[in-house]
Amino acid sequence: MMTERVYDLDSYIRSVEATVLACEERKGGWRIALDRTCFFPEGGGQFGDVGSLYPAEGEPLSVTDTQEAEGTIWHHTDRPLPVGTRVRGEIDWEVRFSRMQCHTGEHIVSGLFHTLYGLENVGFHLGDEEVTIDLSGPVTWADVQEVERRANRAVAENVSVVCAYPAPEELEHLEYRSKLDLKEHVRIVTISGYDRCACCAPHVGRTGEVGLIHLLSMQNWKGGVRLRMLCGSRAVEDVMRKQESITAISNLLSAKQEDVAEAARRMSGELEQTKLRAARLGRALACAKAELLPRETERVLVFEELDTDGLRALVNAALERGIGLCAAFAPEEGRFRYILGSAGRDLRPLVREMNAALEGRGGGSAGMVQGSVTAGRAAIEAWWDKCE
């Protein structure tokens, strides 16, 4: 069963009349083959189209995916249709057009990296959130930004995007990008001045329809780099969200929007200094509280509102006063953090018993353990009163 690929003739056709040629049950649903379709099957790094099938009678069927197998295009649905049924297939145009924008944008970007830096696109994935492009070699972020500028210039020039099947003798002498060694029935997508590439997917008719092309990030990837990219409405929504964040940060820092990075760095440095001062004060407070504890006693149980560093300083200071075992607890969001210290006792068996009794977890070395318990203060005190 060979399916007539209406999308291949015109990527802007949103619906077609067709006849059901086959219907097969598959795990989790059904798949339906039509004699002709405008639904693009998954391929070339792009997901298959989604949409609906409308039979002449009865409720419409949702098409959740489109796949190709041995020349037949299968529409995945949750219900079957009898062979011979006439249907109208209609794609989800918003999803399709967004993918067309992204795929054409990827061609522009990949073509520019190839022309400017001699790099190949060795991996491409068009997800429903973003596009990733894997390049065959390294580039700098300045190189990426230059490609972004030129790609958006291509959008502004509104260059035509031509999809065609060149004759074999023409194809033999044609220079084009391709990950595969193709010999026949090769579909070439040409963006004059920017790219020529073998591709089976639907594309926009002119580059102006791509809209904004925005490269988000770059990371090292298998000897080259992986880029994250957004195009069209996805890029616009991303810019709008980031603008809201920048505006909010600008207001919080009382800084101009173009100066928020420097203001944030300055505040981060100030915060780090504040944390260091607070830690010093916490340790000093812990040592002062330790001075109030008795000397040379077998063990003490204390509850203090200290951070972990302060709690540890308190325990260490208590041990220096000759206390055999110091158990220090601090309240934290419905739990109690603890640090137990001893100069001459292996605390690990003791902490296992305590955690089991007080719904806690933690551990450490023989001389010092830390963790937290969910039991309340009364339960902690009662357990320590009974503890050997």
Image (cartoon, grey):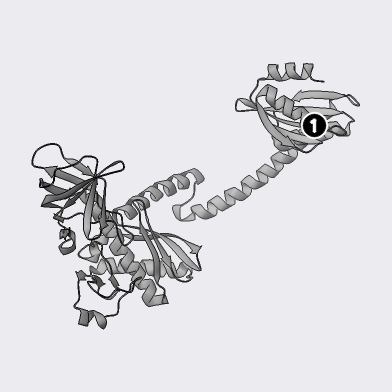
109 w.r.t. 17: above or below = below
* Relative side of 180 to 258, left or right: left
Q: Quadrant of residue 184?
A: bottom left
Q: Tell me, yes or no, if residue 304 can be seen here.
A: no
Residue pictured at 70% horizontal, 39% vertical: 278
Q: Nearer the viewer, residue 125 or 325?
A: 125
* Relative side of 218 to 75, left or right: right
Q: At which x and y percent is residue 225?
A: 47, 65
Density class for disc 1 (Cα within 10 Å; few <14, some 14-19, many ≥20) is many
What amino acid type should be assigned to the residue bearing mark 1?
Answer: Leu
Q: At which x and y percent is residue 36?
A: 14, 56
* Relative side of 39 to 178, left or right: left
Q: Nearer the viewer, residue 198 or 321?
A: 198
* Relative side of 136 to 329, left or right: left
Residue pictured at 73% horizontal, 16% vertical: 382
Q: Nearer the viewer, residue 363 or 210?
A: 363
150 w.r.t. 245: above or below = below
According to the picture, the residue beneath numbered tag 1 turns out to be: 347
Q: Tell me, yes or no, if residue 57 can be seen here.
A: yes
Residue pictured at 21% horizontal, 82% vertical: 169
Q: At which x and y percent is residue 321?
A: 89, 31
Q: At which x and y percent is residue 112?
A: 36, 72
State the SS at label 1: loop
Number of dots carrying numbers: 1
Quarter containing the N terminus: bottom left
84 w.r.t. 180: above or below = above
Quarter containing the C terminus: top right
